[in-house]
């Protein structure tokens, strides 16, 4: 039996996740309406916010790796911990390269983390409700990052 037996997304996770999407939508949505002087600043804000959220997604996997829910082999624990810090490194690189390439790197990394999240759920390491939260949020985040890169 899974450690997390329900597929219902807790209301607090749903509304916090939704609120977390608001800056993505607002920043990317504003970009076409901005003048050439303001657009780079808003793009940088989108990039920075996306980098912080990507790091947060990695932190979730650190927590899942160290949670005492079941025994892990040393190799499995090491792999999970490496996976958990990779998003922060990708976010850092995205911040360094900035611009459209940085936004596209973030979009790719969010998709990669979604696959890691889906795998963790299949293995019983993440709640059964987690994909129901992550899939729509990831779609919004990826769409806004790509839109921001192309705006």
Image: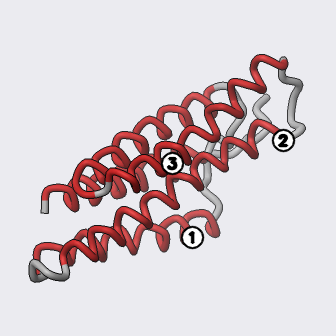
x and y, in percent, of residue 131 in the image = 53, 43
**Within 10 angstroms of label 2, few (less than 14), some, or many (20 or more) residues?**
few
Reply above or below: 71 against 90: above
**SS at badge 2:** loop
**SS at badge 1:** helix
Q: Which mark is residue 67?
A: 2
Question: Toward the viewer: 111 or 13?
Answer: 111
x and y, in percent, of residue 140 in the image = 34, 57
Query: Which badge, 3 or 1, comes first in the chain's sequence?
Result: 1
Reply above or below: 85 against 43: above
Mark closer to the observer (3, 2): 2
What residue is pinned by disc 3? 132
Taking 141 as reference, is 72 left or right? right
Quadrant that contains the C terminus: bottom left
Distance between the Cα atoms at labels 3 and 1? 14 Å
Q: Residue at x 71, y 30 (%)?
A: 124
**Within 10 angstroms of label 1, few (less than 14), some, or many (20 or more) residues?**
few
Q: Residue at x 65, y 61 (%)?
A: 10
Mark closer to the observer (1, 2): 2
Query: Which badge, 1 or 2, comes first in the chain's sequence?
Result: 1
x and y, in percent, of residue 58 in the image = 60, 46
Distance between the Cα atoms at labels 1 and 2? 22 Å
**Within 10 angstroms of label 3, few (less than 14), some, or many (20 or more) residues?**
some
x and y, in percent, of residue 28 in the image = 25, 69
**SS at badge 3:** helix
Q: Residue at x 54, y 71 (%)?
A: 15
Q: Which mark is residue 16?
A: 1
Query: Which badge, 3 or 2, comes first in the chain's sequence?
Result: 2
Quadrant that contains the N terminus: top right
């Amino acid at each position: 039996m899974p450690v997390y037996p329900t597929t219902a997304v807790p209301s607090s996770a749903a509304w916090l996740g939704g609120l977390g999407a608001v800056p993505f939508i607002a920043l990317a949505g504003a970009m076409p309406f901005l003048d050439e002087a303001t657009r780079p600043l808003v793009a940088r804000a989108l990039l920075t916010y996306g980098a912080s959220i990507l790091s947060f997604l990695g932190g979730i996997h650190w927590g899942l790796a160290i949670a005492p829910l079941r025994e892990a082999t040393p190799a499995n624990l090491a792999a999970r911990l490496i996976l958990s810090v990779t998003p922060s490194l990708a976010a850092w690189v995205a911040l360094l390269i900035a611009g459209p390439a940085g936004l596209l790197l973030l979009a790719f990394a969010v998709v990669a983390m979604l696959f890691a999240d889906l795998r963790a759920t299949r293995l019983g390491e993440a709640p059964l409700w987690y994909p129901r939260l992550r899939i729509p949020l990831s779609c919004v985040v990826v769409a806004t990052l790509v839109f921001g890169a192309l705006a």
